[in-house]
Amino acid sequence: MSPAPRSEDRADKTRILFLCTGNSCRSQMAEGFARALKSAEVEAWSAGVERHGLNPLAVQVMAEAGVDISGQSSKLVEELPTLEFDWVVTLCGHANENCPFFPGPVRRLHKGFDDPPSMATEVATQEEALAPYRRVRDEIRAFVEGLPGSLTAD
């Protein structure tokens, strides 16, 4: 895991952890969009309460949107460098209910999105499987585009 950024590298960026169950899809998308679209304002990380591996369909639909997340990896919160986050944004109900304790002044926000892998299990074609990934990707992008202003405490 990479070392924590020095304080002068951070400047006045809002440090956000996107947390999901398996850190395979939704949180990876959010981290990718935040790094691609908001890197001047936001320092983005993602992790899971479990590790499910990077979802290849998430990688595919993000590439369609011009964001390469193929170099990201599925990781647990415990594997992150020691950081003080400003916000922990949970992206699914399970992560919200099982969010670990973060010391310090961190604020939490739950912004739930549907689970593309679950929605794609009963489809007949690859194209049908990609539809929920694309929809959720676009919803996450819209949320991330509003950062950091769209962050409001529960």
Image (cartoon, grey):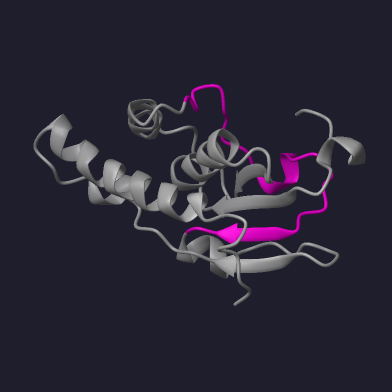
Q: Residue at x 64, y 38 (%)?
A: 39
Specify the quadrant of the image occupied by residue 72.
top right
Please tell me whether the stretch drawn in magenta is mainly helix, strand or loop: loop
Question: Closer to the camera, 73 or 30?
Answer: 30
Above or below, 39 relative to 136: above
How many numbered marks, from 0 up?
0
Question: Closer to the camera, 57 or 107?
Answer: 107
Is 79 on the left or on the right of 127, as rendered?
Answer: right
Question: Closer to the camera, 98 or 28?
Answer: 28
Q: Position of residue 105 (x, y in %)?
A: 82, 67
Magenta residues span 68-91
Q: Residue at x 84, y 43 (%)?
A: 11
Which quadrant of the rendered structure holds the C terminus?
Answer: bottom right
Report if residue 89 lies within the magenta region. Answer: yes
Q: Position of residue 60 (x, y in %)?
A: 34, 27
Above or below, 82 relative to 68: below
Q: Residue furthest left?
A: 124
Q: Position of residue 90 (x, y in %)?
A: 55, 60
Question: Closer to the camera, 66 or 116?
Answer: 66
Report if residue 153 lies within the magenta region. Answer: no
Q: Residue at x 68, y 39 (%)?
A: 40
Is 40 on the left or on the right of 54, as rendered?
Answer: right
Q: Position of residue 97 (x, y in %)?
A: 56, 69
Which quadrant of the rendered structure holds the N terminus?
Answer: top right
Q: Residue at x 24, y 51 (%)?
A: 119
